[in-house]
Amino acid sequence: MPESTDPLDQLPDDVAAAAFRRLVRHLRHRHDAENIELMGLAGFCRNCLADWIRDGGYEGDKGSARELIHGMPMDEWKDRFQSEATPEQIARMEASLARNQGT
């Protein structure tokens, strides 16, 4: 397999890990940035980050990965911070997800 030419792959793991932790802590602080809004805008959310750490080798199950990212059990986070998604939010999310093909 050829070596990647993407400079991101040359970033030292400790630097990448520090940036990832800062992103997760930022999202833990910004509960007003709901997952459905993140999905609609950027095509990823906290739950995606939980999936990605599992894809990267995290040995915990889906629930423990989400708790690690959310900073609390998923059910508690949903009860405290998640509102019902509107049809418009769902439509934006679906359109945004369609743009993720190939990433």
Image (cartoon, helix red, strand yellow):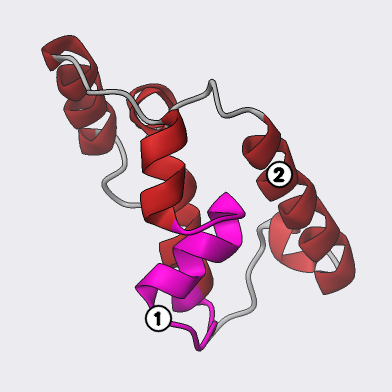
Q: Quadrant of residue 80?
A: top left
Determine whether 85 is above or below 58 in the image. above
Viewer-nearest residue: 79 or 49: 79
Identity, as a three-letter code, of the amino acid under mark 2: Leu
Tell me the residue at 46%/61% (across/down): 66
User: Which of marks 2 and 1 precedes in the sequence?
Assistant: 2
| Residue 57, magenta (yes or no) | yes
Callout 1: few (<14), some (14-19), or many (20+) C-alpha neighbours within 10 Å?
A: few
Residue carrying label 1: 61
Callout 2: few (<14), some (14-19), or many (20+) C-alpha neighbours within 10 Å?
A: few
Residue 44 appears in the figure: no
Q: Which residues are magenta?
A: 54-73
Determine whether 55 is above or below 80 in the image. below
Marks 1/2 in contact by CB < 8 Å: the verdict is no
Residue carrying label 2: 23
Locate residue 91, reporting x and y percent.
15, 19
Q: How many marks?
A: 2
Determine whether 26 is above or below 60 in the image. above
Viewer-nearest residue: 3 or 10: 10
Locate residue 63, reporting x and y percent.
39, 70
Determine whether 10 is above or below 41 in the image. below
Q: Secondary structure at mark 2?
A: helix
Q: Secondary structure at mark 1?
A: loop
In the figure, is residue 58 to the left or right of 3? left
